[in-house]
Image: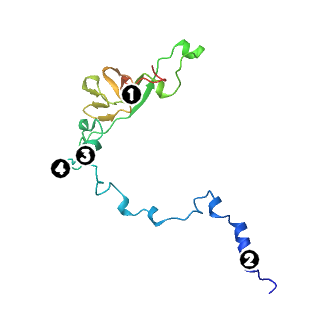
Amino acid sequence: MEGAMAPGMLSSLCDILKPPDEDSDSDEDKPVSSIAQLNPGNIGAASKPSKGTEEKKVEKNTKDIWDSEEIQEGAEFESVYDPRPQPEYDIIHKQAVTSEDMFLQMGNKTPATASCEDMVVKIKLPDTKMADVTLDVKPKFLDCRTPKYFLGLHLPHPVDHKSGKAQWDGKTETLSVTLRLKREYDFMNF
C-alpha cells in the first residue's frame, strides 16, 4: 500500500495539527464536565439554606401583585385612566457658563449633561390660558393638567421641587418649568 500511512505517522500528524491539552489556552480544547451544564433547576434562589446559616422569613401577602421594591418612584402620582391626551414637551438641560469656562477654559465644565445645574421642561399647550394650568412638581415627578391636556412626567434626575420656576409664554402657548437639579457632588459638578 503505497498511499496509506503507517499508524505511527498518523498519530504524529494528529499531534502536529492539534497540540496536547496541557499547553492549550483555548476553552474549546478543555474537557467539559456534566456538572458545569445549566438546567432549569439552577434558575432562582436555592431551595434549602445550607447548615449554619439561618434564613429570615419575610411575610408576603399572596394577593400582592408587586413587591414594594418593584414599584417605580412617583408611580403613586400617576393617573392611568385619564382620557386627556399628552401634550408635546421637551426636556432641556441648562448650565451657567462664565467667561472663565468659555474663553480661558479654567473651569472643569463640559458640554455634557453632567455639568448642568438646571433642567427646563417646555410643555406646549395649544388653545390654553395660563389660568387653566395646574402644575405640581415632586422630587422625581412633574404633573401638569389643563382642561384639554394631562402630562404625568417621570423626571430623569431628582430636582429641588421647592425652588422651581414656571413661566408662561402666551404667544407660543408654552409653559417653561425651570428646575434645579439635585445631585451628589462629584468632580464634575461641585
Image position of 80 (left or right of 113): left
**Figure quadrant of the N terminus:** bottom right
Residue 188: give x, y in percent of width and height. 48, 24
> How far separated are the C-alphas under marks 3 and 1?
34 Å
Q: Mark 1 points at which residue?
A: 122
Residue that extends furthest to the bottom in the rendered view of this protein? 1
Residue drawn at (74%, 77%), measured in percent from left and top? 8
Identify the mark at residue 8; answer none if there is no mark: 2
| Residue 102, placed above or below residue 13 | above
Q: Earlier in the sequence, mark 4 or mark 2?
A: 2
Decide: marks 3, 1 in contact (CB < 8 A)?
A: no
Viewer-nearest of discs 4 and 2: 2
Helix, strand or loop for disc 4: loop
Q: Which amino acid does label 1 sit on?
A: Lys
Residue 76, image x and y in percent? 23, 37
**Disc 4 and disc 1: Cα gap in Å?**
42 Å
- Given residues 175 and 12, the one toward you in this image is 12
Q: Which residue is drawn at 47% across and 17% down?
A: 96
First of labels 2, 3 by sequence position:
2
Q: How many labels does the image show?
A: 4
- Check disc 1 and report its element: helix, strand or loop: strand
Q: Which mark is in front, 4 or 1?
A: 4
Instruction: Find the distance from the CA under tag 4 to the CA under tag 2.
Output: 72 Å
- Left or right relative to 28: residue 35: left
C-beta proximity under 8 Å, tags 4 and 2: no
In this view, the residue in front, 15 or 59, is 15
Q: Which image quadrant is residue 18 in?
A: bottom right
Q: Do the residues labelled 2 and 3 touch (CB within 8 Å)?
A: no
Look at label 4 and name its amino acid: Asn
Left or right placement of residue 124 versus residue 58 in this view = right
Give the labeled residue for mark 4: 61
